[in-house]
Image: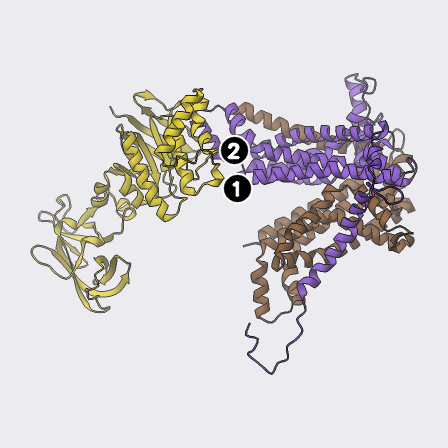
Chain colours: A brown, B purple, C yellow
Amino acid sequence: MKTDRLGHWLAILIGTLYFLVPLAATFEFSLRKLRGVYSFEAYRVVLADPQFQSSFTFSVGLAVVTIVFGMAIIVPMAYFVELRLRKLRPFVEFVTLLPLVVPAIVIVFGYLRLYNSSSLLPLTNSSLGTNFLLTCGYVTLALPYMYRSIETGLRSIDVRTLTEAAESLGASSGTIIWRIILPNIRSAMLSGAFLTFAIVIGEFTFASLLNRPAFGPYLQLIGANRAYEPAALAVMAFMITWACMGIIQVISRNAAAARP
Amino acid sequence: MASNASPASLPRPRVPWAVVGVTPFMAFAVLFLILPTLFLVVGAFQDNEGGFTLSNLGKLWTPTILSSYWISIKVSVASAVIGAAIGAFIAYAAVSGGLPRWIRPTIMTFSGVASQFAGVPLAFAFLATLGRQGLVTIFLSSVFGLNIYAQGFNLLSFWGLTLTYLYFQIPLMVLIVTPAIEGLKKEWREAATILGASTWQYWRHIAGPVLLPSFLGAALLLFANAFGAIATAYALTGSSLNIVTILLYAQIRGDVLHDQNLGYAIAFGMIVITGLSNLCYILLRVRSERWLK
Amino acid sequence: MSFIEISHLKKSFGPNTVVHDFNLSIEKGEFISFLGPSGCGKTTILRMIAGFETASSGSIRVGGAEMTHLPPAKRNVGMVFQAYALFPNLTVAGNIGFGLKIAGKDRSEIDARVAEMLELIKLPDLGDRYPYQLSGGQQQRVALARALAIKPQVLLLDEPLSALDAKIRVSLREEIRALQRELGITTVFVTHDQEEALSISDRIVVMNEGRADQVGTPSEIYNNPATRFVASFVGTLNLFEARVVDPATGRVSIDGQPVVTARDISTYGIADEATVALRPEALTLGGGEGDRNTLTGTVEEVAFLGAVIRVRVRLREARVSLDIFNDPALDLPKIGAAATVSFKKDDLLIIDRH
């Protein structure tokens, strides 16, 4: 029993070290920009870089649009599939798992072939069209996670009974979704949203191959040309991820506590 | 519904709300997920004039392309197997008791964060840790006099990339496999013990076989996860490590092969590999869910 | 000396003592039930016999051998769990043969024993099935076969029926008892269901807060409950605080009405309070012939329960419930009508005299 527990502690310790040492090393490295003293100079340089500001803003905006667009198409679909179109479920399961099967780089390759300037739907001709294409790419990336959390949310409430109760009181489908379903799956949607944000904010493949001035390609560019700034950026990126996952924890804990 | 209850009311045209609600998603899925994939799959079997051919797939059998697949598979297998083993052990340690209560939720939270911390920033973090100027590299050489680079280690290599991938593979494994380990019933162990089994025999005959499908399934998922990844490798090694995603990236950028249909064939090969591993994952999951119900 | 000797057994978890100074002798081939509400310590004792819990003090001996500190694997006992606990990755045959395989028996010997056990539990054709393909009742029979396959010296049953449907519960209970008789195996059965314990056991141990309140045959437990707890836990009972009128002749008064008990109350003093009990089925409506006791009151409620009809009669302060057999020819008593209730002197139980 005693040796058993020792092994468990050892496993946890190794895991913790593997998790913490690179973070500590990155942080330490990011402070080394000025010779001989620890300073936040690398952070200052990064934050003052107009390209940083513009690419970060661009990615945040893109993440928000991705979340709104993704929710707008996924929530009604998940609701009606749960409520009335059960036979579509296997197809939906397949589609939502597809992004885990088809690598992002393959999907974006398909986009470039299908929607290039000489195709029927030349989305890449304008920057607005390309941004739309990028958003669609991000929605596919986030699809497995968004759908999973919304579906879990819908299953935890009794969609059918709630809908029938509302219908018997004369509510329309739109009213039911907006006034009854959405408030009840709010925490599931928020979880999905923050996870999406964490995935999208530093995404590299799509943005780079679609040539958009997003945060991911900017990170890569800095990494190729600077020494200490990348470490500072990594620390910031980690804090963003941490914040998103932390918020999800809080949300789901509150949701669990609110349930009777 | 009593539709004939009030003959005076005109029959309103019924809006098929369910269809209206599902259509945007379906259109999206077809346009931005299924069609692009199909386009590449079909393209892999077409020549420049659009006729059917297997020559694109045949062209994959060149040393450069084969070796890029091979390195990708090696890195993915290594990071999946090692990640799965360590992750499963950590999950078991966290679940099986004997440790303070707060350990488990803490591990789950940290795993959630670390499993999402991938891409370009992860490469930076490992450069700062195990690069030539990295903290651990310097620490090892100044404290133990061990110069790992002189010993043949290189972060921009197979093992370097594997070590880096483990940073998200281990926590991903913890997240996936924990429910399966929690599904092991205490009574199974007691029943085995009272029938005379030792701890080793319990693991050999009961717990091991029960967990095996979940474990293998999770390892396959990790494999696919690593196989399709590019950002970390690209930021870490530039194009010096010839993995298949980087090869395809370069091909799309148009600076290597100058053969569009060969690009489709490379993509098709990747879909086949990740598709197969996901298929096996699903089959294994069905089996273990049946057992752990 | 008995086959199983449990003496001065005690178990504490931190400051909580869940089993206090427990003593019990079990004969070879006996079927003993531990009956009590959850948390009474019955499962803890069973798990100490199995070796999953270690006793804080005291000893357990089986067949003359000290077992208190033996690991479970070395005890040669069979156990059946509430939630079946069949190994999901093994077939029915694999489950039943597991203990023999661990013991290193020959393939042919294992196969023969497995076939014999399958025959015994009347599932001869299901050897190749997996547990998830079986019903709950079938799974529990396989679990029983698995426990018996190793020819254990003791069989432990930890609420084996409580996860099953009511009908299967009764039929499996009869099967278990028949098997136990056939094999003559010493069996300890834990349950919170008094009907189950009464129907299946040679003797019952009624547990309350870590102590054995009473040990006895089902009829002793039912007809002569030793404590108020036993009386109220086993069966339905009318309990009264009666006043002793004459200890020598057994005269007491219930709610101001004089009655006589055949039990010995000579240790009581005049005007002492005594807890007395009446089983609903010992009472009849009307009558009072011979030396039967009578109580009078008014009918307050009539509940139709199928085979029996339960009538509640209000005396002055107290209420008394009685069961009469359902008979279509019977005139049901009217609510509000005056009623006389009678019973034999033997049926007035005296309990709780410490």
Within-10-Å neighbours for mark 1: few <14, some 14–19, many 20+: few
Mark 1–mark 2 CB contact (< 8 Å): no
Of C74 and C43, which appears nearest the observer? C74
Query: Disc 1 marks which residue?
Result: B293
Name the residue rendered at 83%, 52% in the picture.
Answer: A133
User: Does residue C333 appear to the left or right of A207 in the view shown?
Assistant: left
Q: Quadrant of residue B134?
A: top right
Of A191 and B288, which appears nearest the observer? B288
Name the spot of residue B261 as percent of width and height, x first: 86, 40
Name the residue rendered at 66%, 40% in the picture.
Answer: B109
The subunit carrying tag 1 is B
Name the spot of residue A188 as percent of width and height, x first: 65, 52
Name the spot of residue B176 as percent of width and height, x first: 64, 38
Query: Disc 2 marks which residue?
Result: C89
Name the spot of residue B72 as percent of width and height, x first: 78, 31
Q: CA distance from mark 1 to mark 2?
A: 12 Å
